[in-house]
Amino acid sequence: MDMDLKDQAIRERFIGEHGRNFSVIAPAGTGKTTAITRRIADIIMQQSIPPERLAVVTYTNKAAEELRQRTLLEVQKIDGNLNYCNKTFFGTIHAFADQLLRKYGYFMNINSNFEVEKNEHMLWGDFLRSLKGESFIPSIIGNFVSRESLYSLVMNHYNRRIGSFTTDSKVSLPLYLAPLLEFSAKSNGNIARFQKNLRHWLQNQAFPFPKIETSSKEFVALYEHLLGPVEDECSQICAFYFNDLAERFEQFRLREGRFTFHDLIKFSIHLIHHEVAKNLLCNFFIILDEAQDTDPQQFELLLGIAQLPSVINVDFWHNPPLPGHFCMVGDPQQSIYADRTDVTFYQKIHETFTGNGSFEALHFSATLRFGQNIAHQINQIFANILDGKDGQVPFSSLTSAVESSFIEENIDTLSSYVHDWFRFDIAPFEDELSFLCYFFRKKKPQNFNISSWSEMAILCPRKNWLCEIGDAFSIAVDVPKLQIHSATQTYDEFPEFSWPHALLTVVINPQDHFEFSGILHEIFGFPDAKIACYFHSHDVPEILIIEQNFQNIRSQCMALSPLQMLDRLFHEFDLVSRITAIRGDFREEIKKELQLLAAESICNADFLARLQKKSSEIYQSEWIDQEAIQLYTFHKAKGLEWPIVIIPFINRKQMPAPRVFPDVVNQKIIISKRQYEKWSDPHVYQNNTERLLYVALTRQKRQTIFVDDGREPGSDSITAILGKLV
């Protein structure tokens, strides 16, 4: 490090003490990546750990590559052994598990050529087709659960290890519902409506039970007394059948050699418990980055593999990793994936192992991202919000290691009142968008003391508002461009781009077997076995017809313009119908964008190159337009930073999506709102929203600007969260 920080001695201990296990709390901007790379470089210099037994695990491939490259630079700087470094594993937990299974999976009869299926829905469809009409779900559940919901429930059941409770497929409790039907509705329309639905349900018993929406305490109490036990028993029946189907689905994946990402973890855990394999696998040295985003099963694998083989079958809570074999760096304040991870589990590991002396707790507190003024404001705000109560994480205070150099270094509020913009003649949402555009009208980067618009980001609380902001800026006059980044937007989600790209590739280059096999799988739905048979013997008539079709297009259409070729591909392969069949709709605006790309292209090869560039932008979202303000969700902004951050919509409600029953909550199958309210943690959503706000407010280097539209704040808004300060 180029400067001595207030917590420098703590960092040096983490870097240089290789024989201890550490759990490091590293809040936003405190230089955890630098500390991790320096620890790895020091290990390499000291050669204190065998490189092939060292695994550096982080959350994304991008983060893993950054750690690897920065470690190589650090090792080069101190004249270390780069070959040693290259033997060390850098990657995600799934890549690590994949490597273990391919190398040692034969102990469990797992073929090393297994496939990892990114499109789990296609895998699920293949499984259902393999049943050949045989159903393992009783009609009382089958009539209640759609095919898509069934998949989600089964995979949630499988991934979260929900136990089965009963093998009885019938509700054994008597249904004595006369008191509900005879209850006086008087002028209560909700009770009368429920009674009507209940009579219908009794004539055609199937899930779900009629919804109860009245606020009558007496009627609700009667409902819970009579139907509550029945709902609970039905939940147990659902759990049994979902568990049975999950096991059958797992056996199908094992037979086919087609694994999900969760399979990689689960089968690797089985592998390290294998009597012979564990002797080859255990005794690893793990450095875990982004530990707060690690789920319980992933922890089980990583903690288990850092033990001695002799204790691998013992509960890891009572047999922690060997000294020096496990270091984790995380920040519970930035745990923002409540639907996938469990921050309380991470905290339990931290508290248990630091409490019994197996790990030593370290706290990085000096941030290199922003000045003392902002650090002071962050401390003031979040000491009251991240309060450690009701399941919320406690706040870790920050000190700044940065000299303040800008007078506007602060967290400020931009109010529409100031600009006389508050109007009632248009809807509130559109009003705030208009004000946001007005604020940027005729502005240049120099007005904000930045060199380009890419140094500013608008962070949006909800993903479905991104396009609304983008549309508003696109039609406004004299405002900067926006570049939208989506949290889950991938190439596979846009067959309107990816399929024409693949088809044109094969037309231009008939030897591209990789793209051709992808077309057969993705567009035409051929299973891998049939595709393999075709490439081995060409004895698959249906595929031969498709290949002949490509030859005809190639011979007849290579002289066509790119725009004509695009139209021919859509017509020849019926792409609109095929895309609509798998997605339910077709994005006409994307086809127009494709046509524009084709019209601008000189030839088909040029069009292919433009398609490739566009596809890469969608897939990676790595390219940054220097002339555009960056537009992100709070989730997507994690790990990034900008000099200036704008946060709009602070008065709008941040309501969670409504629950669709049945669902999985706290390892239980729930089939009603009553059960959800009974079994769920009422604080989970609020706690996660508060941590999301922490992530958003720690992305700035100099200034965060809230946009206040002057309206009454919603009860679940950012303003309401900040109201905890009052």
Image: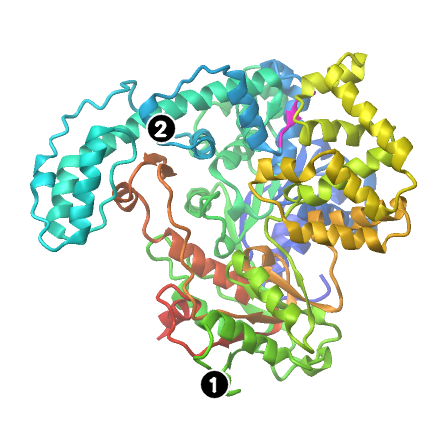
| Chain part drawn in magenta | 113-117
Return the x and y of residue 35 as percentages of the image width and height. 65, 54
Decide if residue 84 is in sight here. no
Of the two numbered discs 2 and 1 in the rendering, the one whose residue sits closer to the viewer: 2
C-alpha distance separating marks 2 and 1 = 54 Å
Viewport quadrant of the N terminus: bottom right
**Would you name the residue on which mark 1 appears?**
417
**Would you name the residue on which mark 2 appears?**
143
Q: Residue at x 66, y 44 (%)?
A: 494
Q: Is residue 386 left or right of residue 598?
A: left
Q: Is residue 115 magenta?
A: yes
Amino acid under label 1? Tyr
Quarter location, residue 138: top left
In this view of the protein, which residue sits in the foreground, 221 or 105?
221
Q: Residue at x 51, y 37 (%)?
A: 299
Viewport quadrant of the C terminus: bottom left
| Earlier residue among tags 2 and 1 | 2
Say few, some or many: other residues with alpha carbon within 10 Å of mark 1 (under 14 / 14 to 19 / 20 or more). Answer: few
Q: Residue at x 55, y 43 (%)?
A: 21
Return the x and y of residue 414 as percentages of the image width and height. 52, 80
- Taking 447 as reference, is 359 above or below it? above
In this view of the protein, which residue sits in the foreground, 719 or 65?
719
Quarter location, residue 18: top right
Q: Secondary structure at mark 2?
A: loop
Return the x and y of residue 95 as percentages of the image width and height. 65, 34
